[in-house]
Image (tube, grey):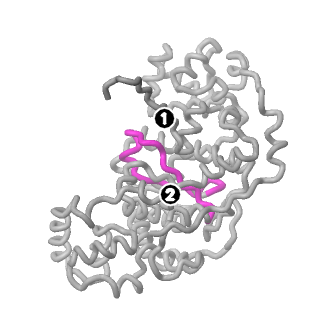
């Protein structure tokens, strides 16, 4: 799992002039925001906080029915309520203005790995986060030329290859390896490869509401987008498999309605074949449940011992009973060298950098984070959070003080 590939970003022509005229915008009055109020922005901001309509209503001093009317657009908050609404939802007053690009993503358009273990408000929060991820991408792409989308079968944006992949997961995984020139061996720096192909990958800051969501993706936006939630970052092998699983959804289920358990199995099958092709891994897998051998293969192929055990069973090298006993032994080895989780922090090329690098390049050409926040109508803190660059204030230590 070496470090090689970096995404190539190019400055978009005309980006400087596009920025002129946006600086120095005056803060609109509550009355002006009332007149141009966007109900979808209220719903998005509320969902981002995981807040119910009843709780928002209680804090705002109105009824839940009034909040529903605000979000449906049948009524608008009074001007005197808008500053308090912005304060509760931790957004600038300009956040509620209509006219900005909005990714209006329907919850049925995103593939969630753990539908049964997530509540509706958690999925709504994930959807709102995904919408904002696209809005940030769009704002940066006006200034920086991002990699062209190269995902066979993807219906939106620029597509380098019009090739349609097979519909069955195994054949699709093999065909994608060929299309991307990946050969038959281990795939190093997987996340970087996805970004080079124009796929936006983003990992939110740690959020309790998103821990059970696991991972999700959508191909219903101008760029395919994969969100890998923080509960996968404690182990790079689980993180990589989740990314390959979501890639399977993008390839196989772009037009299908998410939520079908059969789709989840197909995405798992795709990920297994994509990361460990049958013809290559079969000769390396042990004919018996040799966990230490599998641990060595884990480091070579970048997949967990658990996944390799499943692969042995799937390819007929282990019986169900032998695999079951091996899983029990594996459970007893948790935490030991070769079997302990390997944190993502040690693998920079498996961490998303496309958006942060695009932002850095845009800043080299005159953009400031304050200007970007103003354009998005976000707080600077939220921009940093979405870029994975949460500002940490250093602690002051006085001479002679105790630690």
Asked if residue 206 is among those painted magenta in the image, a careful observer would answer: yes
Task: Please give the name of the residue rendered at 42% of the width and 80% of the height, measured from the top-left corner.
Answer: 277
Residue 317 position, x and y percent, is 26, 83
Q: Is residue 129 above or below residue 343?
A: above
Asked if residue 218 is among those painted magenta in the image, a careful observer would answer: yes
Task: Please give the name of the residue rendered at 61% of the width and 67% of the height, measured from the top-left corner.
Answer: 151
* Quadrant location of the C terminus in the rendered image: top left
The residue carrying mark 2 is 257
Residue 128 visible here: no
Query: Bounds of the magenta span?
Result: 197-223
**Quadrant position of residue 22:** top right
Left or right: 6, with 278 as reference point: right
Task: Please give the name of the residue rendered at 72% of the width and 52% of the height, measured from the top-left corner.
Answer: 144
**CA–CA distance in space, label 1 to label 2:** 41 Å
**Quadrant position of residue 298:** bottom left
Residue 352 versus residue 40: which sits nearer the camera? 352
Image disc number at residue 201: none
The residue carrying mark 1 is 392
Residue 191 position, x and y percent, is 51, 62
Q: Main secondary structure of the magenta part?
A: loop
Task: Please give the name of the residue rendered at 39% of the width and 60% of the height, measured from the top-left corner.
Answer: 236
């Amino acid at each position: 799992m070496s470090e090689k590939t970096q995404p190539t970003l190019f400055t978009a022509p005309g980006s400087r002039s596009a920025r002129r005229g946006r600086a120095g915008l005056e803060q609109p009055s509550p009355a002006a925001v009332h007149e141009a109020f966007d109900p979808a922005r209220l719903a998005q901001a509320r969902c981002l906080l995981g807040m119910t309509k009843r709780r928002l209503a209680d804090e705002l001093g109105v009824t839940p029915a009034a909040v529903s009317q605000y979000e449906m657009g049948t009524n608008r908050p009074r001007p005197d309520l808008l500053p308090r609404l912005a304060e509760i939802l931790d957004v600038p007053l300009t956040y509620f203005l209509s006219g900005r690009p909005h990714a209006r993503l329907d919850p049925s358009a995103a593939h969630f790995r753990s539908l049964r273990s997530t509540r509706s408000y958690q999925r709504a929060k994930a959807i709102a986060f995904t919408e904002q991820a696209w809005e940030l991408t769009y704002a940066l792409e006006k200034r920086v030329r991002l990699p062209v989308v190269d995902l066979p079968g993807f219906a939106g944006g620029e597509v380098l290859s019009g090739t349609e992949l097979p519909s069955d997961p195994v054949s699709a995984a093999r065909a994608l390896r060929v299309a991307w020139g990946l050969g038959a061996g281990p795939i190093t720096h997987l996340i970087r490869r996805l970004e080079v192909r124009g796929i936006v990958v983003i990992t939110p800051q740690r959020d309790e509401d998103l821990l059970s969501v696991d991972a999700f993706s959508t191909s219903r936006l101008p760029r395919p987008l994969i969100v890998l939630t923080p509960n996968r970052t404690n182990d790079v092998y689980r993180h990589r498999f989740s990314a390959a699983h979501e890639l399977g959804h993008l390839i196989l289920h772009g037009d299908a309605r998410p939520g079908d358990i059969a789709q989840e199995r197909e995405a798992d099958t795709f990920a297994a074949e994509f990361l460990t092709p049958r013809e290559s891994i079969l000769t390396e897998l042990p004919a018996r449940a040799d966990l230490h051998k599998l641990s060595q293969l884990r480091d070579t192929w970048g997949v967990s011992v658990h996944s390799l055990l499943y692969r042995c069973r799937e390819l007929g090298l282990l019986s169900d009973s032998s695999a079951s006993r091996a899983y029990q032994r594996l459970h007893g080895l948790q935490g030991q060298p070769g079997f302990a989780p390997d944190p993502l922090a040690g693998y920079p090329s498996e961490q998303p950098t496309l958006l942060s690098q695009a932002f850095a390049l845009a800043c080299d050409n005159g953009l400031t984070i304050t200007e970007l926040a103003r354009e998005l109508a976000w707080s600077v803190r939220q921009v940093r959070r979405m870029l994975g660059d949460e500002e940490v204030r250093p602690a002051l230590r006085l001479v002679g003080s105790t630690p």
